[in-house]
Image (cartoon, coloured by chain):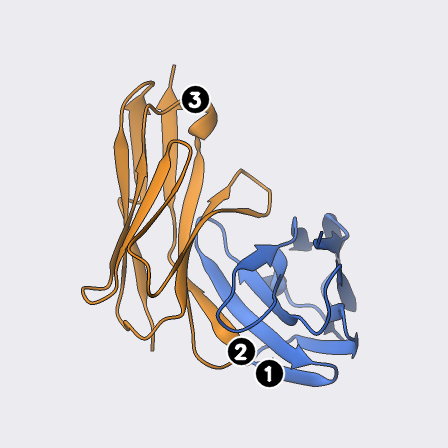
Chain colours: A blue, B orange
């Protein structure tokens, strides 16, 4: 069966520090991968998506970037964190554009 | 641009009541609609997936309907229990790479 791993679960980082959040999927090949951010009490906002290795599409201009170095690995990064980058970050995958989406357990990022 | 609205934003009911959560979307060109459950500080758990060609899906005490032409979906929860307390999110999937657009959720509290 397919599983999705996301880490770390929580992270406290100072303003100006770098960020790297990792997401891996097991049990499937060539998944569509997504990074979302959730503000407190709100729904999810799509940040990046990828349909293949090295293929990254950005939805919202921001201080973040994403990379897909391997088929089932999706990384969210920042060179210098801002206070406004705080939030709950969720990674998701789906087998195709019209299939069910599955989510990781999320990373709570607090920038101080 | 797709917009998803969930009403009500919060709902409090006594245990045993049947209830309905509403979700509406502006663009009917979707692949599917998915209902999720989110517990505080946790990731998303998929509850029901309705493909665009379907009218409803059932799982246990949950029943979700989809009226694509009117841009509406409902999630019906029968005989609610305190363990049903959570935030319920709906998401529609559409477009290239199957991007999901989320509503802001309905926070449900079931009182014993």
- In which quadrant of the rendered image does the N terminus of chain B lie? bottom left
User: Which dot marks residue A57?
Assistant: 1
In the rendered image, residue A100, in percent from the top left (x then y), is placed at 52, 60
CA gap, disc 1 to disc 2? 10 Å
Q: Which residue is mark 2?
A: B97
Residue B104, by quadrant, is bottom left
**Circles 2 and 3: CB distance less than 8 Å?**
no
Q: The numbered mark 1 sits on a residue in which chain?
A: A
- Say whether mark 2 and mark 1 are on the same chain: no
- In the displayed structure, A55 sits above or below B24; it is below
Asked if both marks, 2 and 3, belong to the same chain, the answer given is yes
- For label 2, the crowd category at 10 Å Cα-Cα, with few meaning under 14, some 14 to 19 and many 20 or more, is some
Q: Is residue B40 left or right of residue A80?
A: left
Q: Which residue is mark 3?
A: B82
The local secondary structure at tag 1 comes to strand
In the foreground, A35 or A94: A94
Disc on res. B75:
none
* Viewer-nearest residue: A9 or A100: A100
Q: Is residue B18 left or right of residue A105?
A: left
Chain letter of mark 2 equals B
């Amino acid at each position: 069966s397919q599983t999705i791993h996301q880490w770390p679960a929580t992270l406290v980082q100072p303003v100006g520090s770098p960020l790297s959040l990792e997401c891996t999927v097991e049990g499937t090949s060539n998944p569509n991968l997504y990074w979302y951010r959730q503000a407190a009490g709100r729904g999810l906002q799509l940040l990046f998506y990828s349909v293949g290795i090295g293929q990254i599409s950005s939805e919202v201009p921001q201080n973040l970037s994403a990379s897909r170095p391997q088929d089932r690995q999706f990384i969210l990064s920042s060179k210098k964190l801002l206070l406004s980058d705080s939030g709950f970050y969720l990674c998701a995958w789906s087998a195709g554009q019209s299939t069910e989406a599955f989510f990781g357990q999320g990373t709570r990022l607090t920038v101080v | 641009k797709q917009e998803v609205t969930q009403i009500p934003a919060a709902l409090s009911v006594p245990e045993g009541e049947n209830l309905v959560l509403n979700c509406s979307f502006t663009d009917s060109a979707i692949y599917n609609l998915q209902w999720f459950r989110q517990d505080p500080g946790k990731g998303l758990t998929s509850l029901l997936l309705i493909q665009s060609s379907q009218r409803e899906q059932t799982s246990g005490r949950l029943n979700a309907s989809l009226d694509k032409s009117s841009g509406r979906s409902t999630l019906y929860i029968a005989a609610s229990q305190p363990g049903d307390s959570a935030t319920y999110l709906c998401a529609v999937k559409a477009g290239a790479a199957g991007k999901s657009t989320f509503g802001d959720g309905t926070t449900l509290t079931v009182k014993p």
